[in-house]
Image (tube, rainbow, N blue to C red):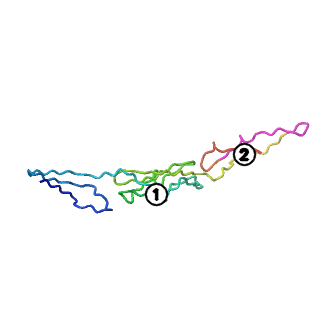
């Protein structure tokens, strides 16, 4: 008569399934065979309660460093609780003006992952400054006391704390 021995011998309901389970079979003629069995977790973690968008503003030096957003939500997993949380790019990364994708990733012990993307919109709220402009002008009028207004905007020298002077719209009125 053949006997099958399971190691570990007992798995209680509700308990996590062991990563390794071995079966030993004793054959009638004295030959022993060990059959390893390994549980395979193929279920991804679940990421929840993270915002989809965040609005932020540059400081006066036109800098904004990314904070750690992993604690803004949570994650759960069928085997690894809590799963390992990661953020890409990492906290401390310097963000650019405009939309920036920040990926929150949960990973379990088996390498299964789940992700949530937060779009971080970064705005420059500091107004540009006029560094230099054209000096006062004396303009002659015609016989009807009329004159043509010249476009002086091209003579302005402007600056912006974030350096994007090409994006500055100059309006003369």
Task: Please state, as top left, top right, bottom left or bottom right, where the C terminus lies in the image.
Answer: top right
Q: Which mark is residue 70?
A: 1
Number of marks present in the image shown:
2
Q: Quadrant of residue 134?
A: top right
In percent of width and height, residue 7 lies at 21, 58
* Label 2 – label 1 distance at C-alpha: 48 Å
Badge 2 element: loop
Left or right position of 5 against 46:
left
Q: Which mark is residue 133?
A: 2
Name the residue nearer the viewer: 92 or 35. 35
Q: Is residue 161 magenta?
A: no
In percent of width and height, residue 78 lies at 37, 57
Left or right position of 147 against 156:
right
Q: What residue span does the magenta drawing correspond to?
A: 140-158
Q: Residue furthest top?
A: 143
How packed mark 2 is, by other alpha carbons closer than 10 Å (few <14, some 14-19, many 20 or more), is few
In percent of width and height, residue 133 lies at 72, 45
């Amino acid at each position: 008569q053949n006997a099958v021995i399971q190691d570990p011998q007992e798995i209680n309901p509700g308990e996590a399934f062991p990563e390794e389970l071995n079966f030993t079979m004793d054959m009638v003629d004295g030959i022993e065979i060990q059959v390893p069995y390994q549980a395979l977790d193929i279920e991804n973690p679940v990421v929840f309660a993270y915002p989809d968008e965040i609005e932020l503003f540059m400081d006066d030096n036109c800098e904004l460093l990314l904070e750690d957003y992993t604690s803004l939500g949570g994650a759960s997993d069928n085997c690894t609780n809590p799963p390992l949380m990661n953020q890409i790019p990492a906290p401390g990364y310097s963000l650019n003006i405009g939309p920036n994708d920040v990926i929150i990733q949960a990973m379990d012990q088996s390498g299964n992952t789940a992700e949530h993307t937060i779009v971080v919109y970064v705005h420059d709220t500091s107004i540009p400054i006029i560094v230099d402009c054209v000096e006062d002008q004396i303009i002659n009028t015609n016989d009807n006391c009329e004159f043509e207004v010249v476009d002086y905007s091209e003579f302005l020298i402007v600056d912006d704390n974030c350096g994007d002077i090409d994006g500055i719209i100059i309006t003369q009125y």
